[in-house]
Amino acid sequence: MTDLKTRITEDVKTAMKAGDKARVSTLRMLTAEMKQREVVDAVELTDAVVISAIEKMVKQRRDSEAQYRSGNRPELADKEAQEIALLLAYLPQQLTAAEVDALIAQAIAETGAAGGKDMGKVMAWLKPKVAGKADMGKLSGLIKGKLG
């Protein structure tokens, strides 16, 4: 078992013993997503795969939270926000804006990117370095801004 999967499994047990229903519910959704990737997608469950699953779930919850807020459903939006906070605790520490800018500059320099048509090269170079440490959607926007 990977370190992250082991940690999540132990946290489920701890939350169950403590009677923390919200935490148990969120962590069970996460373990179901991990099992989905392991069995249906037939991938080996590494920390990178688990991080990818967590990122997907965080993105889904951010979308839901925004929709609930625009639909004037603050109680549901707050529930999504709590789940996001719980899931973010399992991701590596996020990069600062300065670190992201430095990595983008390095990626552009090393790939020789000159314009928007080279965006794929820059993203391919950056993706393994920022996996789980930065929002890829925001990163994409920053790269577009730099490549003009």
Image (tube, rainbow, N blue to C red):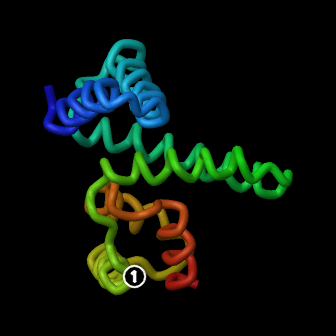
33 sits to left or right of 102:
right
Using the image, determine if residue 61 lies above or below residue 41: below
Q: Residues within 10 Å of mark 1 (few under 14, many from 20)?
A: few
8 sits to left or right of 56:
left
Q: Position of residue 139 (x, y in %)?
A: 47, 69
- Total numbered labels placed on residues in the image: 1
Using the image, determine if residue 115 lies above or below residue 93: below
At x 36%, y 77%, the residue is 100
Q: Position of residue 1 (x, y in %)?
A: 14, 25
Q: Amino acid at mark 1?
A: Ala
- Of residues 31 and 74, the one drawn nearer to the viewer in this rendering: 74
Q: Residue furthest right?
A: 71
**Residue 90 seen anywhere in this rendered image of the structure:** yes
Using the image, determine if residue 74 lies above or below residue 54: below
Tell me the quarter of the image containing the C terminus. bottom right
At x 71%, y 48%, the residue is 75
Q: Which residue is mark 1?
A: 97
Q: Residue furthest top?
A: 39
Q: Position of residue 9 (x, y in %)?
A: 25, 27
At x 68%, y 46%, the residue is 64
Which of the 4 image quadrants contains residue 17?
A: top left
- Of residues 102 and 18, the one drawn nearer to the viewer in this rendering: 18
**SS assignment at label 1:** helix
